[in-house]
Amino acid sequence: MTPAAFRPKLPKWAIRGRAGPAVRWCDSCEGRRNMTYTGDVTVGGPADTRELPGLTITKVSVGPMDNNAYLLRCTGTGELLLIDAANDADTLLELIGDIPLATIVTTHQHWDHWQALQAVQQATGAKTAAHPEDAGPLLVTPTDLVRHGDTISVGDAELSVIHLRGHTPGSVALCYDAGGALADQPQLFTGDSLFPGGPGNTEHDPKRFGQLMDDLEARVFAELPDGTWVYPGHGKDTTLGVERPHVPEWRERGW
Ligand SMILES: [Zn+2]
Ligand SMILES: [Zn+2]
């Protein structure tokens, strides 16, 4: 993966203005954790946490590629799941604390998304999950191979696996809708397949680009509502409502 994977960002106002009632801005407020979630995190800075029905999501940025790691906690059982042990095992283990980590999901095979996988797995004994098409390069052989349509549980919470081909052959997104309670606001973790401003990097390969756009259109935009909150593998969050009007432009420009 190269920095070219970072897609151009929409202007801040576009996200601020249209991301829905969860977003309120108070950058200097000490109480931000409990007041509002923005998902704007920086390497070395504080994590950002939001409480949802059945699930608490904590986002932290780690490593030289500004990777996002997401720690999910079932509010019923306290069980934890980590999406991308990307880098900086110390920071991730501090977030995890004394609570047993059940599972680490790796969204895709690129090195920047699993630099801390071995250390965090060894420290916690967690199961590890990835798609078979991307499992090969991982230093930790996944205990669980997950495919399109599969479900990954964290305590009582269930995440559905969406296979998105193109950025890599075995990239996965994870979707949480609280058993329907968040049907209008599903929570979607996209790895490097979807960012604010466009799809993930397909290295100017028209076939890979076409595949990723096809999968994004059929498996994400056609299936999920505008209120879907998107947590990408790098950078700021967005919503499908913000991105949807631009999908034809992405297809047209070819990247
Ligand atoms: Zn990446
Ligand atoms: Zn990547």
Image (cartoon, grey):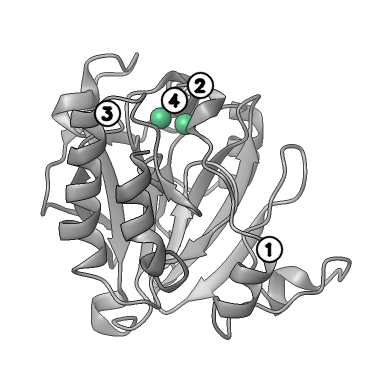
Q: Read off the residue under disc 4.
A: 114
Kind of residue indicated by mark 4: Trp
Lower position in the chain sequence, tag 2 or tag 3 = 2
Left or right for 172, reference 133: right
Cα separation between marks 2 and 3? 13 Å
Q: Is mark 4 within 8 Å of ligand 1?
A: no
Identified at 86% across, 68% down, the residue is 30
Residue 86 in sight: no
Cα separation between marks 1 and 4? 29 Å
Q: In the image, is residue 165 above or below residue 51? A: above
Q: Count residues near mark 1 (Cα–Cα under 10 Å), then give few for <14, some for 14-19, many for 20+.
A: few
Q: Which of 192 and 177 lies nearest the eye of the viewer?
A: 192
Q: Which of 204 and 54 lies nearest the eye of the viewer?
A: 204
How many numbered badges does the structure rendering display? 4
Identified at 24% across, 42% down, the residue is 212
Kind of residue indicated by mark 1: Lys
Q: Which mark is residue 2?
A: 2
In the rendered structure, are the residues bearing label 4 and label 2 in contact, judged by CB atoms less than 8 Å apart?
no
Q: Count residues near mark 3 (Cα–Cα under 10 Å), then give few for <14, some for 14-19, many for 20+.
A: many
Q: Nearer the viewer, mark 4 or mark 2?
A: 2
Q: Is mark 1 within 8 Å of ligand 1?
A: no
Q: Read off the residue under disc 1.
A: 12
Left or right for 242, reference 48: left
Cα separation between marks 1 and 2? 24 Å
Lower position in the chain sequence, tag 4 or tag 2 = 2
Q: Read off the residue under disc 3.
A: 168
Q: Is mark 3 within 8 Å of ligand 2?
A: yes
Q: Secondary structure at mark 2?
A: loop
Kind of residue indicated by mark 2: Thr
